[in-house]
Amino acid sequence: MSLSHILTLVANRDATTLTDAHVSAARDMVKGGPPSILSPGEAVDIPCPAPGPGMPTLDTIRAVFGPRHIDTLLTRSRGRRKGLLIADMDSTIVANETLDDLAAHAGIGERIAAITRRSMNGEIDFATALRERVGLLAGLPASLLETAWKDVRLNEGARTLVATMRARNARTALVSGGFTFFTGRVAALCGFSEHHANTLDIRDGTLTGTVGEPILGPDAKRAHLHRLAEAGRLKLAATLAVGDGANDLDMLRDAGLGIAFHGKPIVRSAIGNRVDHTTLRTLLFAQGYPVGAFVTGE
C-alpha cells in the first residue's frame, strides 16, 4: 500500500506532551509507516495511505486526539513546502479583532462585537456587516486608532511562520477584511512581503463612518490568492492559506493547503485541516519543517 500522505500530530506544549503511545495509536489507526520526529514531545510526521475505504476520516482521528490537546493534519507527501503564504489578520496572525478593540475604546464595543460575531459565523454578508460597523464609528477621533493599536498582540508563532517561509523563498501576504492602519503595522512586525485590507475614511482627524470602496471581502481574498500564485508562477497546490472566519472560506478552499486556525464553527465544519489546540508553528510542522529549521522570529 502506497504511503502517499502524511499525518502530522502536534501537541499543545502547555497542556500535554506527545508520547510514544500517542504516536503508536495514530500509526495503528492509519496503517502508518515509521514516524519522523519534527519536535521531540511536540510534533511528528507519520507516512500513511491516502484517505479512502478502510481508512479513518480525519474527523475520526481528530475525535481521538483532540481531547488530548493534540492537533492532527493530513497532507500529501509530495509538494508539502509551499511557495506562498496568504494569511488573515484578525484572530489569526493577531489575537485581536481590531475593529472590536477600536469600538471598545469608543464605548460601543458590544454593539460592534455582536455584528462581528454574526459576520464571522456567516450569518450576515461581510460587506454589509462592515459598512454597518464602520457607520457606528462616525464622528469619533481618528486618534482612537493609535489607542487600539496598543492592544494588538501577535499570536504565538506568527513571526516564526513568516520568517521561516520567507527564508525558503516563499512569498507571504497578509490579506484582511480589517483596515490598512493595522495591516501595515502587523505586516512590518511579522515581515510579510505585502498586505491588503480596507481603508477607513478620515476627514480632519475624524472618522467619517465610511470605508473605501470596493470593500475587501471573501471574493477579494480569493482573488489575491489566485493573483499571487499566478505572479509567482505557482500552482494552487503550492499555496498555503490560513484564517478563522466565514470570509476566509473561499480562500481556504482554493489553496493547496487551507488551514482553519481556531476557526469559527462554520469554518471548522467546512475545512478539513484545522488548528484547534496549538499555535501558528503548526503550519510549519504541517509542511514538514522540523523545529531545527525554524527561523525564530519571536
Image (tube, grey):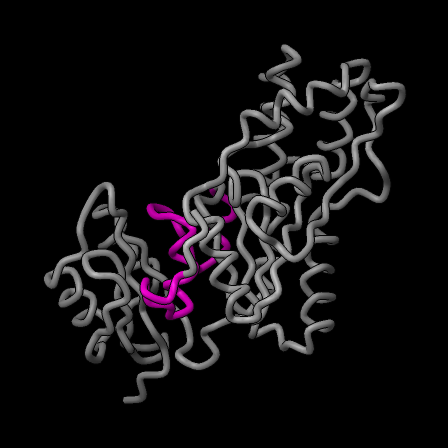
- Could you say which quadrant of the image residue 204 lies in? top right
Query: How many numbered markers are drawn?
Result: 0
User: Camera-side residue: 126 or 261?
Assistant: 261
Q: Where is 239 relative to 271, above or below? A: below
Residue 170 painted magenta: no
Residue 272 painted magenta: yes
x then y, percent, for residue 51: 36, 74
- Horizontal side of residue 96 vs 131, given as left or right: left
User: Camera-side residue: 110 or 181?
Assistant: 181
x then y, percent, for residue 49: 31, 80
Placement of the N terminus among the 4 image quadrants = bottom left
Q: Where is 240 relative to 270, above or below? A: below
The extreme right residue here reads 204
The boundaries of the magenta stretch are 265-294
- Horizontal side of residue 215 vs 283, given as left or right: right
- Could you say which quadrant of the image residue 207 lies in? top right
x then y, percent, for residue 76: 42, 76
User: Camera-side residue: 80 or 127?
Assistant: 80
